[in-house]
């Protein structure tokens, strides 16, 4: 099984074993019904989840006290990558799946490959490494500019706008 980290148990919340969790993606953590915790990937079932400030407060069925939660404090929580991929919406992608994908323009001209994805307040940015340039090409990850992402073919098609390339 391949795992993806979606957060970290930072501390306990209250006395009934609820976990205060820092998370990477609210959408993924909201959909989580079963997680795997720590290096040993112990399976834990989520009985409830709510959000408080920038944290998720999660109650696990198997944990009913602070003492039971302490072994997981500071440990990452993971999801099964295959389950995540099945539950993604049509236009949702895992960053790991986008890295190294080949990028072409809408006339099938090769531009480069995805080196990284950066976060910005408005939208994610695809950072493309081209053999013809020293700097990265920064492409806003919006459907008007990136109409096609084919995970199976590991290929992204962009509609270049003036000044982008």
Image: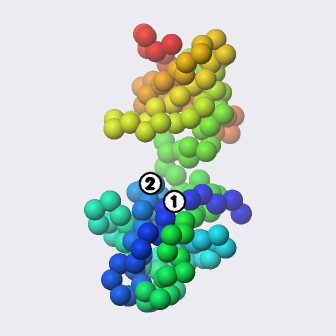
For the N terminus, the quadrant is bottom right
How far apart, in angstroms, are the residues tagged by discs 1 and 2? 7 Å
What is the number of the mark on residue 6? 1
Picture colour scheme: rainbow
- Decide which of 156, 13 is in the foreground and name it: 13
Q: Position of residue 25 (x, y in %)?
A: 44, 54
Query: Mark 1 packing: few (<14 Cα in 10 Å), some, or many (20+)?
Result: some
The residue located at (49%, 82%) in the rendering is 70
- Residue 84 higher or lower than 161, as above or below: below
Q: How far across and down, in percent of the image, does residue 129 sit?
A: 61, 23
Q: What residue appears at the point 56 percent right and 43 percent down from the top-left corner?
A: 95
Up-down relation of residue 42 to residue 24 (above or below): below
Question: Residue drawn 57% across and 25% down?
Answer: 128
Q: Is residue 81 visible?
A: yes
Residue nearest the observer in this picture, 162 or 88: 162
Residue 153 is labelled as none
Quarter holding residue 38: bottom right
| Residue 108 seen in this snapshot | no
The picture places residue 139, in percent across and down from the top left corner, at 47, 25
Q: Position of residue 81 (x, y in %)?
A: 62, 57
Query: What residue is disc 2 on?
Result: 25
Going by the image, does 114 lie left or right of 29? right
Residue 46 vs residue 69, the one in the foreground: 69
Q: Secondary structure at mark 1?
A: strand
Give the structural element (helix, strand or loop) at label 2.
Answer: loop
Q: Residue 130 versus residue 105: which sits nearer the camera?
A: 130
Left or right of 137? Residue 103 is: right
Q: Residues within 10 Å of mark 2 (few under 14, many from 20)?
A: few
Q: Are marks 1 and 2 in contact (CB under 8 Å)?
A: yes
Nearest to N terminus: mark 1 or mark 2: 1
């Amino acid at each position: 099984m391949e795992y993806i980290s979606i957060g970290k148990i930072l501390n306990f919340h209250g006395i009934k074993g609820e976990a205060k969790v820092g998370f990477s993606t609210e959408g993924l953590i909201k959909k989580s019904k079963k997680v795997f915790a720590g290096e040993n990937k112990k399976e834990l079932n989520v009985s409830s989840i709510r959000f408080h400030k920038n944290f998720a407060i999660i109650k696990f069925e198997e944990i009913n006290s602070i003492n039971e939660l302490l072994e997981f404090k500071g440990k990452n929580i993971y999801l099964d990558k295959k389950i995540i991929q099945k539950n993604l919406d049509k236009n949702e992608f895992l960053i790991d799946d986008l890295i190294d994908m080949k990028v072409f323009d809408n006339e099938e001209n090769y531009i480069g490959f995805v080196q990284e994805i950066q976060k910005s307040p408005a939208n994610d940015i695809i950072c493309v490494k081209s053999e013809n340039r020293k700097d990265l090409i920064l492409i806003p990850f919006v459907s008007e500019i990136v109409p096609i992402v084919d995970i199976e073919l590991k290929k992204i098609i962009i509609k270049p706008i003036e000044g982008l390339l």
